[in-house]
Image (spheres, rainbow, N blue to C red):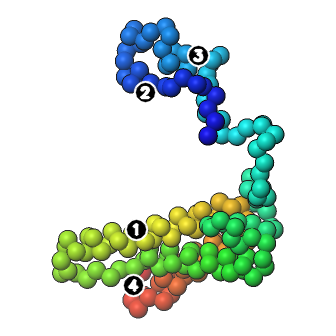
Amino acid sequence: MHFASSTPFDILTLFKPPSMWSSNSNLVNQMNPNTLQLPMAWTNDPSHVHTKPHLWHLSFYWGRNTYFLFPNWPGNNRTMYGLGIIFVFVLAILVEFFSNLKLVKPGSNRGAAVFFQAGVQAIRAGFAYMVMLAVMSYNGGVFIAAILGHAVGYVVFGSPIFKKDMDR
């Protein structure tokens, strides 16, 4: 990692009143916008060569050459891309399933019920974050798979169509 500044930053200086800052303090020097030196996230150094193709998009696109969720997956393989779309679709359905899951019966041990529901909520949140990260690939097919998966999951698990009691 390359840092533009060779002097270390003293975090404790932040907690001192400004009157105690010395004129040669790192904080005073770094707070001056003319001398502000931050860590560089990238470099124009010609010796720095990227070996992987750039696949990050800032708007939706419709190609199958993409990466989402895992490094180098699905890549440029049509079969793997189709599998990835199905995977995101199923994940979105599972998010809706866990959102509407009611396994705790009245009269159950309250402590055990709370921990069980917390576990179910953690699984649901993990799947929801995975769907969100897949959508952040900005691939149109992944986005549509996530939306359709949530819609199908709601119809099957959340709507009153497939419920036993139609009182809603």
Q: Which residue is mark 2?
A: 11
Residue 61, horizontal then vertical, whole percent: 79, 62
Secondary structure beneath dot 2 equals helix
* C-alpha span from label 2 to label 1: 35 Å
* C-alpha span from label 3 to label 4: 66 Å
Residue extending farthest to the front is: 47
Mark earlier in primary sequence (1, 3): 3
Q: In percent of the image, x 81 and y 40: which residue is there?
A: 46
Between label 2 and label 1, give the one nearer the viewer.
2
Disc 2 crowd, CA 10 A, few/some/many (<14, 14-19, 20+)? few
Q: Which residue is mark 4?
A: 167
Say which amino acid is labelled 1: Ala
Whether pointer 2 and pointer 1 mark residues with C-beta atoms closer than 8 Å, the reply is no
Q: In percent of the image, x 33 and y 68: which residue is there?
A: 118
Q: Quadrant of residue 44?
A: top right
Q: Which residue is mark 3?
A: 32
